[in-house]
Every structure is written in C-alpha cells, then in structure tokens.
Image: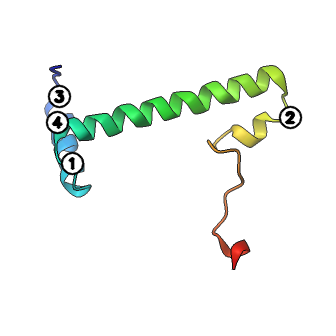
C-alpha cells in the first residue's frame, strides 16, 4: 500500500514514530488506524446503548470501557 500525506502530516507521523520508538512509519500508521477503529467502536456502542436502554448511554459516553474514571486511590 502506498499513501500520500501533506507535508505537515508526514512530518507529524515521523515525529510520532520517533517519540514513541516505533520501528517504522507503517507501525505509526497502524496505531492511527487502530485509534480510528477504537473511536468508531465507542460511538457505535454508545448508539447501541441509546437504542436499547437510554439510561446505559451515560456509562458509555466519553468512556470506552463503561467504568467511571478514577485515580486508583480507591485501591490503596
């Protein structure tokens, strides 16, 4: 597969690759595709929750795992 990116996007991709110690630009693009997929899944799950139980949607919006955010202090 071959892709073309605007110069600023290509520059960012290379900076991201270096900053995250990825072995190739392909690995950096894979991370981006995975993030897009995860974002879409979260939206789809929220839509499904709205269709099936509007009360459950609050557990999914802005939180992909359905858990409330915390700093871990409750486990200390």
The label shown at residue 10 is: 4
Compared to residue 73, the image places residue 32 above or below, namely: above
| Cβ atoms at labels 1 and 3 below 8 Å apart | no
Location of the N terminus (image quadrant): top left
Q: Earlier in the sequence, mark 2 or mark 1?
A: 1
The single residue placed furthest to the bottom in the displayed view is 76
| C-alpha distance separating marks 4 and 1 | 11 Å
Left or right: residue 15 compared with residue 52: left
Give the percent coordinates (x, y) of residue 33. Answer: 36, 31
In-image side of 58 versus 42 (left or right):
right
N-terminal of the two: label 4 or label 1?
A: 4
Q: Position of residue 38 (x, y in %)?
A: 50, 34
Q: CA distance from mark 2 to mark 1?
A: 40 Å
Instruction: State the residue position of label 1.
Output: 17
Residue position for label 2: 55
Please tell me how crowded label 4 is: few (under 14), some (14-19), or many (20+) other residues with Cα within 10 Å. Answer: few
Question: SS for tag 2?
Answer: loop
Estimate how packed mark 1 is, as few (under 14), some (14 to 19) or many (20 or more) residues with alpha carbons within 10 Å.
Answer: some
Secondary structure found at label 3: loop
Q: Position of residue 3 (x, y in %)?
A: 17, 22
The C terminus lies in quadrant: bottom right
Residues at discs 2 and 3 in contact (Cβ within 8 Å):
no
Mark 3 vs mark 4: in front: 4
Mark sitting earlier along the chain (2/3): 3
Identify the element where label 1 is drawn: helix
- The mark tally for this picture is 4
Closer to the N terminus: mark 4 or mark 2?
4
Q: Is the residue 33 above or below the residue 24 in the image?
A: above
Picture disc at residue 45: none
Instruction: Tell me if label 3 and label 4 are in contact, CB under 8 Å.
Output: yes
Q: Which residue is mark 3?
A: 6
Query: Separation of disc 3 and disc 4 at Cα?
Result: 6 Å
């Amino acid at each position: 597969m071959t892709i073309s990116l605007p110069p600023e996007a290509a520059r960012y991709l290379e900076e991201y690759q270096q900053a995250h110690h990825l072995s190739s630009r392909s690995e950096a693009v894979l991370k981006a595709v995975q993030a897009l997929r995860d974002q879409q899944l979260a939206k789809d799950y929220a839509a499904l929750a709205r269709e099936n139980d509007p009360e459950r949607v609050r557990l999914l919006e802005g939180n992909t795992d359905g858990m409330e955010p915390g700093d871990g202090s409750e486990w200390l």
